[in-house]
Image: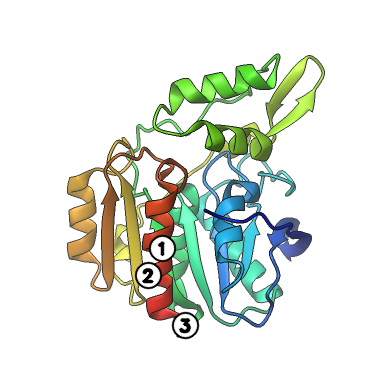
Amino acid sequence: MTTATTPASGSVQASGLALHYLDWGNAGATPLVLLHGLGGSARDWRRVAAHFAPRYHVIALDQRGHGDSPWAAPDAYSTDDAVADLEAAIEGLGLPRVILCGHSMGGMNTIAYTARHPERVICALANDIPPALGAARHAGPSSHPLFPTREAAVAARRAESPTTPDWALELLADARLKPVPGGLTFRHDPAATSRWRWPDLWPAARTISRPILFIRGGRSPVLSAETLMEMDLAIAPARSITLEQAGHATFLDMEHEWLAAAEAFFAAHAR
């Protein structure tokens, strides 16, 4: 089980935005950069970061429009925008080479960055995301719901994510909600979800030359077993595992198994 640590907050300039990040210290160790998913925040990674902090310099980024980072223009929430931010953030933080780990939207950004900058990536992990999503997939609502209580917010998430344990639902409530008149609502910019635009990353993914691990949730609707097999065959250095009892948030749903897989993969390449 992970041990809690208190990260330091910082900001880094990227594409005209002062992006917020959390830094668990251990400067001088191999950098591990964590990218949350759509609607998430750097705090989603709290237990993962605490687990890896003794061995790595762990930094979790609040991507544009999320967490404590500024909101962008409504039409500036594309994968290309996010990757440009990541390029600037890694440069601005003085990180010559990194381990890159992203969940969902952050996993798509991980795939794109790893393809474009193999010289800056030691290895990468993309969690439960394919290189392309169907054009008909709806990213998210254009406005946030209002929850009268924290318990109501947790109950709504529980109904959407039956594979996620209660401790993780509480963690996500801490990470993603903010108080407003009348109750609680989500912290991120509604446009960040409703207007997220993603390209077809298959051509770029096929050029990836750095070790990359894909982790799929066996009960997730986002990444199918067939697409994962296609990814393994198309991307020469790719490896993959499926956590059969997990949904989309595999690092929460099956935390112990996810950490074991990620730890072994990182250790094999960060020498």
- Tell me the tag on residue 119: 3
The quarter of the image holding the C terminus is: bottom left
SS at mark 3?
Answer: helix
Q: Is residue 58 above or below residue 1?
A: below
Separation of marks 2 and 3 at Cα, in angstroms: 19 Å
Q: Residue at x 57, y 38 (%)?
A: 39
Q: Provide the residue designation for mark 1.
A: 262
Residue 131 visible in this rendered orientation of the protein: no
Q: Give the x, y percent position of residue 145.
A: 63, 19
SS at mark 1?
Answer: helix
Q: Amino acid at mark 2?
A: Phe
Q: Residues within 10 Å of mark 3 (few under 14, many from 20)?
A: few
Q: Amino acid at mark 3?
A: Glu
Mark 2 or 3, which is nearer the eye?
2
Q: Is residue 156 above or below residue 241?
A: above
Q: Provide the residue designation for mark 2.
A: 265
Q: Earlier in the sequence, mark 2 or mark 3?
A: 3
Q: Earlier in the sequence, mark 1 or mark 3?
A: 3
Nearer-the-camera pick, 76 or 210: 210
Q: Do residues under tags 2 and 1 come within 8 Å of each other at their CB atoms? A: yes
Q: Residue at x 63, y 51 (%)?
A: 42
Separation of marks 2 and 1 at Cα, in angstroms: 5 Å
Q: Residue at x 30, y 63 (%)?
A: 203
Separation of marks 1 and 3 at Cα, in angstroms: 21 Å
Mark 1 or 3, which is nearer the eye?
1
Q: Give the x, y percent position of residue 12.
A: 75, 64
SS at mark 2?
Answer: helix
Q: Do residues under tags 2 and 3 come within 8 Å of each other at their CB atoms? A: no
Q: How is the image coloured?
A: rainbow
